[in-house]
Image: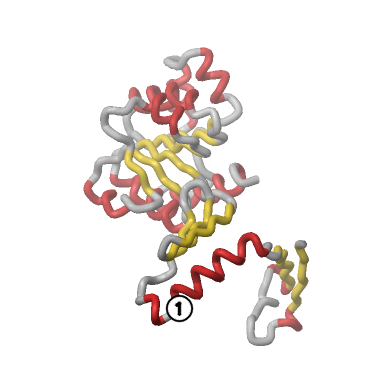
Amino acid sequence: ASAVHHFSLADQGETGLGAGCDGQLSLSFTRLTEHHLAPMRSAACRALDPTQGTQPLCAHVNASGMLNFDHDGSRCDIRLGAPLRVFIGGNHIDCLPMYQLCNHMGWFVYGNGKQPILKQYQNDFFYRLPPAMALPEFFQQHPIDAILIMNHHFQRDVDLLEASVAAQSCRYVGLLGPERRYRHCQKHLSDAALDWLDSRIHAPMGLPMPSKGPQQVALSVTAQLASLVRA
């Protein structure tokens, strides 16, 4: 059963939980069932047992939002909210702050950038598009929540906008550049792409900001994604 606990400034104590918005904080707690706890308890006991060696108890969240506990053949899976799945289309160096911020948010990032500096983000939360795989095929095989188009190349922008129709789970398509750039792209898109993009396109992408450097773009887009896609 779930329970909601409310804290105010008077409840700070050792935890400091009262330092919420307007001095109040409400937390919802959900009790795990024995079905979840038993395998976790068994694996933890073996991990801490000195007679069983020194192999650690491993826990991680995969791209499907599954929390996995593994130790010596014992496994427990708990489904959590899946991280946001973002495709970043672009090979320019100003994509780097976008990769960094998505990585910091714990989002699962797909990309086709080839800049050497982006290689540091090829980890559990980054997947590079295979060179031989066409974008429509990729979007059909990989559920995507958001597509960010940062190519600095008009024809590549058009190609990615057209291909995005295959990403049926996508709810956000952001295009870097001024509003007139998308108006120009529209002249080269199919009717099917225009209809599909109508409720998803954000051009320019991101929340309005007085300055639009790479870091500000990444911040404004991340804020917009968090407010729209997770709403």
Residue 222 vs residue 55, the one in the foreground:
55
**Can residue 47 be seen by looking at this rendering?**
yes
Residue 207: x %, y % from top left: 55, 45
Residue 14: x %, y % from top left: 64, 86
Q: Kindly identify the amino acid type of the residue bearing the numbered disc 1.
A: Leu
Disc 1: CA contacts within 10 A as few (<14), some (14-19) or many (>=20): some
Vertical arrangement, residue 196 with respect to residue 101, above or below? above
Q: Quadrant of residue 25?
A: bottom right
Residue 205: x %, y % from top left: 50, 39
Residue at image position (77%, 66%) is: 4
> Quadrant where the C terminus lies?
top right
> Quadrant where the N terminus lies?
bottom right
Which residue is tagged 1?
48
Residue 57: x %, y % from top left: 44, 69
**Can residue 216 be seen by looking at this rendering?**
no
Q: Quadrant of residue 21?
A: bottom right
